[in-house]
Image (spheres, rainbow, N blue to C red):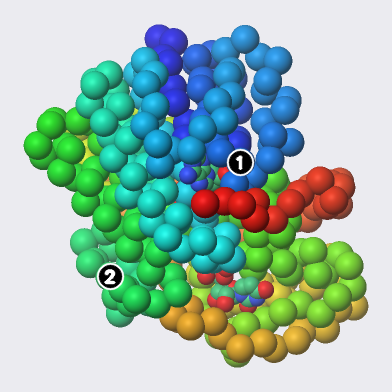
C-alpha cells in the first residue's frame, strides 16, 4: 500500500538515504528540513520524482500536513554541530518531538523517533541494553543533545500511554557511510579527509575509547523494519553494529586502506567523551530479524570511495544566523 510519509531531517545524512529508499518503494514522501547541517545537494536527485516533495521548515514550529507515517530525524547529530547552538539543539529535540507527535496524534499516524546511544551517556554498563538507564551529565557540553533526546523519548512514551499514538523509538549508535557531511567533525569523516589529504589524523586522548560503527544502509534497513513492524512496539530498540573498535584501531584501518603517509597527532579528549560504547542488539535481532551485514573495512572502503568523488567546497558549516 502506498503511504504518505513525512521524514523530518530528510535532507541530512541518514534522512536523505531514508527518503531515497521510501521513494524507491513507491511511497509519497515529504522531506522536511531547515538545512541547518545539510544542503539540497543531498536530495537534488530526488526533486524530479513525482512522489517526492521538499519543504524547507524548522520543526520547532508546528506544521499541518496529512500523513500516515512520520520518521522524526530532525536534529543536528555530530558533537560539533549540536554544540554550535546548544539551546537550539534542545528546542529541536523537545519542540520537534511535541510538534511531530501532535501531528501524529491528529492524523493517527505511526511515528518513529531517531533517538541515540547518547541516552546512555558515558555508560557504566557494557554492552548497553535497552534496559540500562544511562549515565548522563545534565550540565555538560553533550547535555543539550543527550538530555534533549532523553526528553524526546519521554514525550514519545507519554503520547503512547496517554493518547495511544503508535510510536517507535530507535536508539541509533554511531553510523557512517557515503554522503556523511565531510566537515561534521565526526571521527570517520575527519580521519578519511585527513588521510586523503596527507594531513595528521587528530586522535583525541589515547585513542583507547571505543565506538561501534554501523554502515548507513544497514541502519536505514533497521529503521524501516522497526517502523513496519506490525505489532505495537513502543519501547526503545537499539540499532547499531555490535563490532566494537578503539578509535586508535579506526585510525590504523583508515591509514592502511588509504595507503596514506599521514601521521597521528594526539589532541585532548573532549569533556564527557564516552569511554566505551557497544550496543546489545539482541532485541532488534529477535523483534525485527535484523542485524548489520557490512563489515567495518568494507563500509570504510565505500565511504572513502565516495569522499574521493566529492567537491568539498560544496559543503558548508552550520548557518551562522541559526537562531
Ligand atoms: P544530520 O545532521 O546529517 O541530519 C539532521 C538533519 O536535521 C539535517 O538535515 C538538519 O538540517 C536537520 N535539522 C536540524 N535541526 C532542524 C530543525 N530545527 N528543523 C528542521 N530540520 C532540522 O545527522 P544524521 O546523522 O543524518 O542524523 C539524523 C538523526 O539520527 C538525528 O536525529 C540524530 O540525532 C540521529 N542519530 C544519528 C546518529 C549517527 O551516527 N549518524 C547516531 C545516533 C542518532
Ligand atoms: N575523535 C577523534 N578524533 C576526531 C574526532 C573524534 O579521536 O577527529 C574521537 C572522539 O573523541 C570520540 C570518538 O572519536 O571518542 C567518536 O567521536 P564522534 O565525534 O565521531 O562521535 P561521538 O563521540 O558522538 O560518538
Under circle 2, the secondary element is loop
Q: Nearer the viewer, residue 161 or 151?
A: 151
Q: Quadrant of residue 24?
A: top right
Residue 36 as seen in the image, left or right of residue 285: right
Report x, y in % for residue 11. 60, 36
C-alpha gap between disc 2 and disc 1? 31 Å
Residue 23 as seen in the image, left or right of residue 160: right
Under circle 1, the secondary element is loop
Report x, y in % for residue 34. 56, 39
Cβ of disc 1 within 8 Å of ligand 1? yes
**Circles 2, 1 touching at the beta carbon (< 8 Å):** no
Q: Quadrant of residue 70?
A: top left
Relative to 297, residue 104 above or below: above
Query: Which residue is denoted by mark 1 in the rendering?
Result: 35
Report x, y in % for residue 302. 74, 50
Residue occupying image coordinates x 60% and y 28%: 20
Residue 64 as seen in the image, left or right of residue 24: left
Residue 68 as seen in the image, left or right of residue 241: left
Relative to 263, residue 199 above or below: above
Residue occupying image coordinates x 48% and y 78%: 273
Q: Quadrant of residue 203?
A: bottom right
Query: Which residue is denoted by mark 2 in the rendering?
Result: 134
Relative to 267, residue 157 above or below: above
Q: Nearer the viewer, residue 282 or 19?
A: 19
Report x, y in % for residue 55. 55, 26
Classify 10 Å Cα crowding around label 1: few (below 14), some (14-19), many (20 and above): some
Amino acid at each position: 500500500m502506498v503511504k504518505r510519509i513525512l521524514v523530518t531531517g530528510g535532507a541530512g545524512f541518514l534522512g536523505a538515504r531514508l527518503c531515497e529508499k521510501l521513494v524507491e518503494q513507491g511511497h509519497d514522501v515529504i522531506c522536511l528540513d531547515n538545512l541547518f547541517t545539510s544542503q539540497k545537494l543531498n536530495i537534488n536527485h530526488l526533486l524530479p520524482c513525482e512522489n517526492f516533495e521538499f519543504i524547507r521548515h524548522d520543526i520547532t514550529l508546528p506544521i499541518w500536513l496529512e500523513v500516515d507515517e512520520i520518521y522524526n530525524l530532525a536534529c543536528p547529530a555530530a558533537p560539533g554541530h549540536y554544540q554550535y547552538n546548544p539551546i537550539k539543539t534542545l528546542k529541536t529535540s523537545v519542540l520537534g518531538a511535541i510538534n511531530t507527535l501532535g501531528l501524529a496524534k491528529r492524523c493517527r499516524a505511526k511515528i518513529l523517533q531517531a533517538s541515540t546511544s547518547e541516552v546512555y551517556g558515558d555508560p557504566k554498563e557494557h554492552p548497553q541494553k535497552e534496559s540500562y538507564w544511562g549515565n548522563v551529565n545534565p550540565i555538560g557540553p553533550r547535555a543539550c543533545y543527550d538530555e534533549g533526546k532523553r526528553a524526546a523519548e519521554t514525550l514519545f512514551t507519554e503520547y503512547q500511554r496517554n493518547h495511544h499514538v503508535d510510536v517507535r523509538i530507535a536508539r541509533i549508535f554511531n553510523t557512517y557511510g557515503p554522503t556523511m557531511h565531510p566537515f561534521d567533525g565526526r571521527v570517520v569523516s575527519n580521519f578519511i579527509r585527513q588521510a586523503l589529504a596527507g594531513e595528521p589524523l587528530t586522535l583525541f586522548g589515547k585513542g583507547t575509547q571505543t565506538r561501534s560503527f554501523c554502515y548507513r544502509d544497514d541502519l536505514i534497513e533497521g529503521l524501516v523494519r522497526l517502523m513496519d513492524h506490525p505489532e505495537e512496539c513502543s519501547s526503545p530498540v537499539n540499532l547499531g553494529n555490535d563490532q566494537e573498535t578503539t578509535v586508535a584501531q579506526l585510525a590504523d584501518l583508515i591509514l592502511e586502506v588509504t595507503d596514506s603517509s599521514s601521521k597521528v597527532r594526539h589532541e585532548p579528549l573532549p569533556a564527557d567523551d564516552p569511554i566505551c560504547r557497544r550496543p546489545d542488539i539482541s532485541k532488534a535481532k529477535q523483534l525485527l530479524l535484523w542485524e548489520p551485514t557490512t563489515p567495518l573495512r568494507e563500509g570504510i572502503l565505500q565511504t572513502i570511495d565516495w569522499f574521493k568523488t566529492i567537491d568539498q567546497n560544496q559543503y558548508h558549516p552550520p548557518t551562522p544566523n541559526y537562531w
